[in-house]
Image (tube, coloured by chain):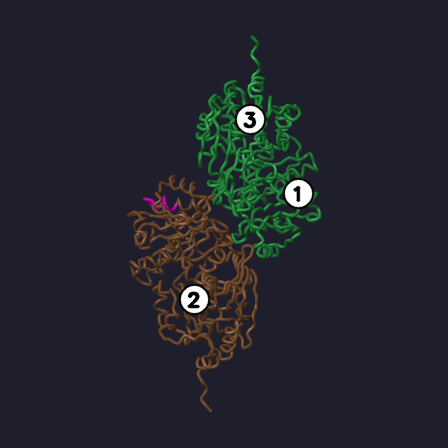
Chain colours: A green, B brown
Amino acid sequence: MNAPAHPIEQLHAELADLDWVADESRIARLSQDFSWFSPVLKRQLADKKAAAVVRPRSEDEIRRLVGLCARLRVPITVRGSGTGNYGQSVPLQGGVLLDMSGYNAFLWQRNGIARAQAGIRLWDIDKATKADGYELRCVPSTFRSATLGGLFGGGFGGVGSINYGPLAARGNVLGLRAITIEEEPQFVELRGAEALLMHHMWGTNGLVLELEVGLAPVHDWMESIVSFDTFDAALEFGDAVARATGIVKKEVCFLAHPVPEYLKQLESSLPAGCSALILATAGASEAPLLELVAQFGGSVTYRKTAEEVARSGRTLLEYTWNHTTLNAFKVDKNITYLQTAFVAGQHVEQVKHMEKLLGGEVLMHTEFIRNMDGNVTCTALQLVKFTTEERLQEIMQIYRDNGVRINDPHVFIVEDGKAGGDLPQGFTDIKKRFDPMGLLNPGKVRAWARPGEIAPA
Amino acid sequence: MNAPAHPIEQLHAELADLDWVADESRIARLSQDFSWFSPVLKRQLADKKAAAVVRPRSEDEIRRLVGLCARLRVPITVRGSGTGNYGQSVPLQGGVLLDMSGYNAFLWQRNGIARAQAGIRLWDIDKATKADGYELRCVPSTFRSATLGGLFGGGFGGVGSINYGPLAARGNVLGLRAITIEEEPQFVELRGAEALLMHHMWGTNGLVLELEVGLAPVHDWMESIVSFDTFDAALEFGDAVARATGIVKKEVCFLAHPVPEYLKQLESSLPAGCSALILATAGASEAPLLELVAQFGGSVTYRKTAEEVARSGRTLLEYTWNHTTLNAFKVDKNITYLQTAFVAGQHVEQVKHMEKLLGGEVLMHTEFIRNMDGNVTCTALQLVKFTTEERLQEIMQIYRDNGVRINDPHVFIVEDGKAGGDLPQGFTDIKKRFDPMGLLNPGKVRAWARPGEIAPA
């Protein structure tokens, strides 16, 4: 009788027909994401690696894999395209990484609703729905590669949130199909609010197979940059555009001087010293937009019609949200970033105040959105000239002390990030139901950690 | 040599080819509008009548008419379908009434913008644009008969303002063509903010021939009534629906007990004693809507899909905005109404407070909208059990004393209504440019009145 095989060997042997990734350097690469944006996470997560990576192609493959992992007590971490910034898909305890990017069928659309497998790229959903006059309601700047499951499991919203709020706003996600992590896995459909109990949980309390989302009508989105001489004029213009109910829009991104200097590819459209707005607005709203530009003393320094954008294959949206940060890294490796949520109604004053307190060290980049209460506000992804982890913590504390919420992007524990503290019971109920053995992405949720697994906050 | 003819006779004689209304009772009827909603205006305006009514069919007819009126110094009052409530189209000083309802061509639409002649019915615009997937952004409950010019000249917005705000919000009206009131009339195109200087001025500072407006994407609007046992639950539910960025909607109308009792045609869908919401929401948002219904303890007591609404030819929208008031009149001739604008963010508390102060005498009916600042709030068209004009004034003062704005619907002077005081200079500049002799709808604007023409405020 042979010695019992290592569980990972058993998985490979018993499920030899699955698409396993053999190359070790590829396994290492697939075990990482964009958490290197944070020097803290980079230090903490650099050596984390899955023991095996598999790329499922069908529900049946997923069922067999999950069942065997449950029997063998092998941790399972799910991954979309790895565009997350908090190590959402970085396996802390080895095990199997499920690369869902091949599980990517578009299933159906009707009446402004679409359903697809979790591994579909956001870009591919838009391609499928555009002919019917629809598109996704809110997408990260990584929409070209990011997956639907990844957005749901680890994302916030993004471009389009100025209309539809965060992805978590009731009605944006309508339902999902998930599989329980058991020896005899069950397929379960969750609808509405219950489905949201798996949102932004980094795949720790459910393995999502399909998602059903509300869509938005497509407009002929033109893209422009509006440049200003002063911080205040640019910010106030952005707020005015965001608030203008008669100006149809999809993106309002404010980049305070000197952030535009980091966007080298847009150099010719960003006058030296400017603060600028990157906008996506409907063609029908160009005239009223230009009225606001004139009123606030700005200059349109870049303008492409929807047709020109489509033809060029290049979009300004890939300079907004965390793509601003990504572009800044190309110029200066020594930066990092914050995530903050300003108080709606006080947001313009708060942004100005924080600029006064920390300008020069913290470079302002805000994104206008509607929040969960339907109010216009801005969230921010400020660039930080990084010195030490202690100073980074100090900066975040200065924000908190000034009444601005920090959604800490330098942690990989769910409760320590955007969740901002203990999880409501509903999330734990879902965990027990879908992952009774605690195999999903272990080490990321304080509430469900084994003793000593996660250090106290 | 004959004695000089009366100017009206001269108009008839020199422009005999125009479509003059001969019937005196029809002239009397066309000289009135829905200002009888107000007992004050009813008393003040009942005997007002044009000396002649003409129905122009072409720009050339309008040009000839206007030129001759200018030469003869004959007042000109413009009228759409007469659905206004403030006597906007009631001629105070006789003269010629221009019934624009025959000047109603749909001119063009492209990329979410439409242009039409002022006399077109709103309903006919929607019919023309629906095939392209568009509809008007905000319409009054009178959309079936009301004209585009009438909405612009005397309206506010309405159904759809929960998305696009008031018609006056930048970008909803993109431009207009107007004619100057001179012996040699000029045709002038005004764009954007300049066009808005003729908005809600009751045709006193410009005679608008064509309007160009931004459109909204059509959704499959389903209509429902959600009934509640309590005022507070219904109001709070309405606010939650209004704020829910992920619930696609077009109308959120709150009718507090006992207002639903006045809507006899909907009796079977309005349980005794209920407070209710009338909603138009996208089919894709039904599930999240029902979650909110359950959360706030409501019951769906009426539900029609977009297809059922279209097939029936009946719409709940004709029970909202001032159609609520109209329906109440059918039951009780002794009511009137208010128009108030609550402070965004404080609106729910203000509505509750005013109900406590005046409930029983003032019956709450609010309409959720986004205001000019992009904030969710509600405006209201409360029913009032009318006793005396003095008490009506008292009630409005109680509102003002509690920090709620009154847009007085019991006045026919522009400054005394929604304008709420002196007009900015821009309006006067437009007046001088388009009506240098002061012939348009005289007696309605304090700033331009001849001495003694309008009593002091």
Q: Can you give x and y, in whole percent of width and height, for residue A398 in the image?
A: 58, 36
Q: Earlier in the sequence, mark 1 or mark 3?
A: 3
Residue labelled with disc 1: A259
A298 is higher (above) or lower (below) than B178: above
Residue labelled with disc 2: B88
Q: Can you give x and y, in whole percent of width and height, for residue A139 in the image?
A: 56, 41
**Is residue B90 inside the magenta stretch?**
no
Q: Secondary structure at mark 1?
A: helix
Disc number lying in front (3 or 2): 3
The amino acid beneath tag 1 is: Val
Specify the quadrant that holds the N terminus of chain A: top right
Q: Can you give x and y, in whole percent of width and height, for residue A404 in the image?
A: 54, 39
Q: Give the residues drawn in magenta, as a range.
A: B227-235
The amino acid beneath tag 3 is: Thr
Residue labelled with disc 3: A77
Crowdedness near tag 3: few (<14), some (14–19) or many (≥20) residues, C-alpha within 10 Å: many
In space, the residues marked 1 and 2 are separated at their CA atoms by 52 Å
Crowdedness near tag 1: few (<14), some (14–19) or many (≥20) residues, C-alpha within 10 Å: many
Q: Are marks 1 and 3 on the same chain?
A: yes
Marked residue chain, label 1: A
